Image (cartoon, coloured by chain):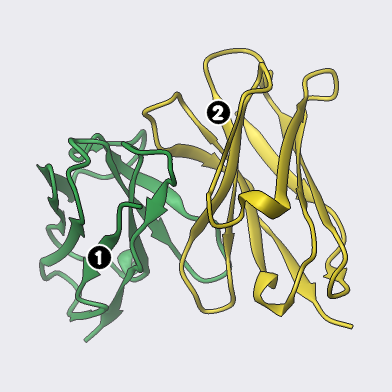
Amino acid sequence: EIVMTQSPATLSVSPGERATLSCRASQSVSSNLAWYQQKPGQAPRLLIYGASTRATGIPARFSGSGSGTEFTLTISSLQSEDFAVYYCQQYNNWSPLTFGGGTKVEIK
Amino acid sequence: QLQLQESGPGLVKPSETLSLTCTVSGGSISGGSYYWGWIRQPPGGGLEWIASVYYSGSTYYNPSLKSRVTISVDTSKNQFSLRLTSVTAADTAMYFCARAGGGYEPFDYWGLGTLVTVSS
């Protein structure tokens, strides 16, 4: 099983500031890495796929980078609606598909 | 716009079988190279992939749950379903159905989720 480790668990950021979230895979997942945003009471929403491609309708302030085992999600200037939990997921290996434990981005 | 909607009992007794259905609207379940899956999230917890199915019926399971899980697709009803046997309190979770765009694609459409509680 590929273990996905996200850090930090909680990130306290002021509106307008930059947020950098990390995701590490226990073995290479190539660029088959997605990021999701989840707000309370809602389903996850796809933000980034292929490690760096924004999904349809996702603002340009969200960007992804990395390949292999190290990945980063950057939110360039946090807006009020961006405070949420963010998950990474690898889809390179189906046995099984795995998610990271999440990073909660909270208001500082 | 593609929509997915989970349905099924919200309360299941321990040792019994959890059965959920996901109804797809706004598109055909067999209309492309899509994989249809179930993901769950315990209260306050993270996301766990359970299983996925291709419209042709090919299935893929999380090894940790494989012995208790069956996923199936009914193209005539535009639905796919999940059965989880011998449930315990540890199976209490929000269950989401979702679509992946292909074999090496993320989940791009999600249902709203349905909360299943295992309790006597």
Q: Nearer the viewer, residue A55 or B104?
A: B104
Give residue B85's position: percent from left, percent from top.
Answer: 79, 58
Task: For chain B, give the colour.
Answer: yellow
Q: Is residue A105 left or right of residue A67?
A: right
Q: Nearer the viewer, residue A3 or A62?
A: A3
**Amino acid bearing label 2:** Tyr
Residue assigned mark 2: B35
| Other-residue count near label 2 (Cα within 10 Å), few / some / many at <14 / 14–19 / ≥20 | many
Q: Residue at x 67, y 51 (%)?
A: B67
Q: Chain of mark 1?
A: A
Q: Chain of mark 2?
A: B
Residue assigned mark 1: A5
Q: Secondary structure at mark 1?
A: strand
Locate the N terminus of chain B and report the quarter of the image it occupies. Answer: top right
Task: For chain A, give the colour.
Answer: green
Q: Is residue A10 left or right of residue B62?
A: left
Q: Quadrant of residue B54?
A: top right
Q: Quadrant of residue A18?
A: bottom left
Q: Nearer the viewer, residue B116 or B83?
A: B83
**Height in image: B90 above or below A26?**
below
**Height in image: A65 above or below B44?**
above
**Amino acid bearing label 1:** Thr
Rendered image: mark on residue B69: none
| Other-residue count near label 1 (Cα within 10 Å), few / some / many at <14 / 14–19 / ≥20 | many
Give residue B46's position: percent from left, percent from top.
Answer: 46, 68
Q: Residue at x 74, y 33 (%)?
A: B72
Q: Quadrant of residue B94?
A: bottom right
Q: Secondary structure at mark 2?
A: strand
